[in-house]
Image: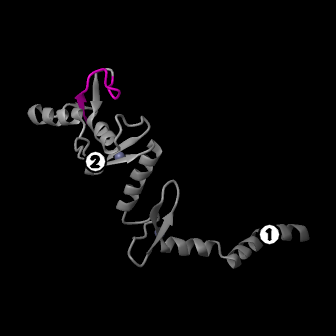
Amino acid sequence: MPEAAKLAIREAQLKGPRLDGGYMVVNVGHDHPASNRAGCAPVHRLMAAEMFGMGVLPEEWCVHHEDEDKTNNEPSNLRVFASNSLHAHWHALLRRHRQTHCLHGHEYTADNTRIETRTRPTIHTARVCRACEREKQRRHNPRRRARRAAARMAPTTLRRTV
Ligand SMILES: [Zn+2]
Ligand SMILES: [Zn+2]
C-alpha cells in the first residue's frame, strides 16, 4: 500500500475521511506527481496505481468502485479501466444485467433467454430475448415481405390500368 494511502486511512480513522466530490483524498504534498492544486490526491487512484506497480495511474485510466461506495478503497473493491468509454460500457452492462425484462417487456426467464458472446467494445456476454428474436424473424420472413411488397405495388398497377 502506498505511504500516502496508508496515511489517508490512518487520518480517516482518526478524524473521519477527507472527501472531495465524494472521493477520499489525502494530502500528498505539491511535489507528488498525482497531487492536485491543493496538494491532495484521491486515495482510490493511489491504491490502483499501487496495484499495477505504478507511481501514478495514467490520467485516462478510470477506477471503478465495485460496491459503488466511493470511500471503500480496498483493492478488492477497485476495478480499473483503460478509458472512460470502457468504464461507461461496464456501467451499461451492470444496468442491463439488473434488468429482469427486455426492452419490449418480455421477462428474461431461462426459457426466454439466450446468452450471446459479444466482442465489442470488450468481450462480454449479453442476454438476448427469444420472444423478440422470433418477432424479428417473423418481420423479416421473406414470404411476408413479398406479400407486403405486392401490397405496395397494387395501387400503382391499378393506376396504370385505369
Ligand atoms: Zn464506475
Ligand atoms: Zn423481448
- Name the amino acid type tagged 1: Met
Above or below, 131 relative to 91: below
Residue at 65% over, 76% down: 141
Residue at 44% over, 42% down: 84
Taking the image as shown, residue 63 lies to the left or right of residue 133, namely left
Is residue 113 rendered magenta in the image? no
Single out the residue that lies furthest toward the left: 14
Front-most of residues 147 and 15:
15
Which residue was labeled with disc 1?
153
Q: Is mark 2 within 8 Å of ligand 1?
A: yes
Front-most of residues 29 and 117:
29
The answer to whether residue 22 of the structure is visible from this angle is no
If you read the primary sequence from the N terminus, does the residue marked by circle 2 or circle 1 appear first?
A: 2
Disc ID at residue 68? 2
- Name the amino acid type tagged 2: Glu
Q: How is the image coloured?
A: one colour
Instruction: Please provide the residue range marked out in magenta.
Output: 22-36
The answer to whether residue 122 of the structure is visible from this angle is yes
Q: Neighbour class for label 1 at 10 Å: few (<14), some, many (≥20)?
A: few
Q: Position of residue 41 (x, y in %)?
A: 29, 30
Q: Quadrant of the N terminus?
A: top left
